Amino acid sequence: MKGKGYINKALELLYPPSLYCSCCGNLIDESRIYNLCDHCMSHIRWNADEPREIDGMYTLCCTRYGIYERTLIFALKYNRKTYIARDIAQIMADRLAVEGVRFDVIVPVPLFSGKEKRRGFNQTALIGKHLGSHIKAECLDHGLVRTADTLPMRGLSPTERELNVKGKFALNEKYSGRLKNRNILLIDDFYTTGSTAGECFRALQKAEPGNVWFLAFAAG
């Protein structure tokens, strides 16, 4: 994994991501917001809906899930284009600025340890670290742990999704003191039925936090 990391860094020096659209790869200039060309910017399904409160947690998303949003997420997760985490973090920071809300701590939805080891990173934790620098909040990338692996959510019914993640998340006790009475932003790359977000929210309650919000890049 380290070797691949060095290769990726070398490629970024040779081909700076700011020269190419993060979504389609077309040549752009450094002035383009979010490293997206005009075509992709116009086709991203930006979301401006107000936050929704679900079982005591406010939820918010930046975009609706579609081809362009999926391309960004998949390029980050599976093609190891980790610089896209910076772009998504900037989108999230701007979405939060519109809502005028602030947080003390960012907690990314965790991957199962085996999956994170195989992939080499948790894409949501990478986004969280960049987001933390934007909004001046601490990112606890292992504030929660996934206690067991889960099936892929794709193709599962809402009930199957709920059962798939039920009881699979736990508070990392070493960080409980850093979460108590603090306002927490729980983040993920994708949101569908809310099953994962809800389980993470319940796990965080053990730390007796302040307000907890959930923010996703894309919602389907």
Image: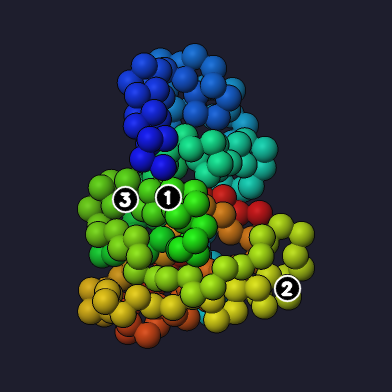
Q: CA distance from mark 3 to mark 1?
A: 12 Å
Name the residue at 26% across, 76% down.
Answer: 174
Q: Foreground mark, 1 or 2?
A: 1
- The residue tagged with tag 3: helix, strand or loop? helix
Circle 2 crowding by C-alpha within 10 Å: few under 14, some 14–19, many from 20:
some
Query: Which quarter of the figure is the C terminus placed in?
Result: bottom right
Q: Is residue 48 visible?
A: no
- The residue tagged with tag 1: helix, strand or loop? loop
Depicted 177 relative to depicted 190: above or below:
below
Callout 3 amino acid: Lys
Query: Which quarter of the figure is the N terminus placed in?
Result: top left
Q: Earlier in the sequence, mark 3 or mark 1?
A: 1
- The residue tagged with tag 2: helix, strand or loop? helix
Callout 1 amino acid: Phe
Residue linked to disc 1? 121
Q: Is residue 123 left or right of residue 162?
A: left
Name the residue at 56% across, 54% down.
Answer: 190
Q: Which image quadrant for residue 149? A: bottom right
Residue 118 percent location from the top left of the image: 50, 51
Q: Is residue 114 visible?
A: yes
Q: Earlier in the sequence, mark 2 or mark 3?
A: 3
Callout 2 amino acid: Glu
Count the numbered circles shown.
3
Name the mark on residue 129. Answer: 3
Residue 196 percent location from the top left of the image: 56, 69
Q: Which image quadrant for residue 154? A: bottom right
Q: CA distance from mark 1 to mark 2?
A: 27 Å
Residue 91 percent location from the top left of the image: 43, 42
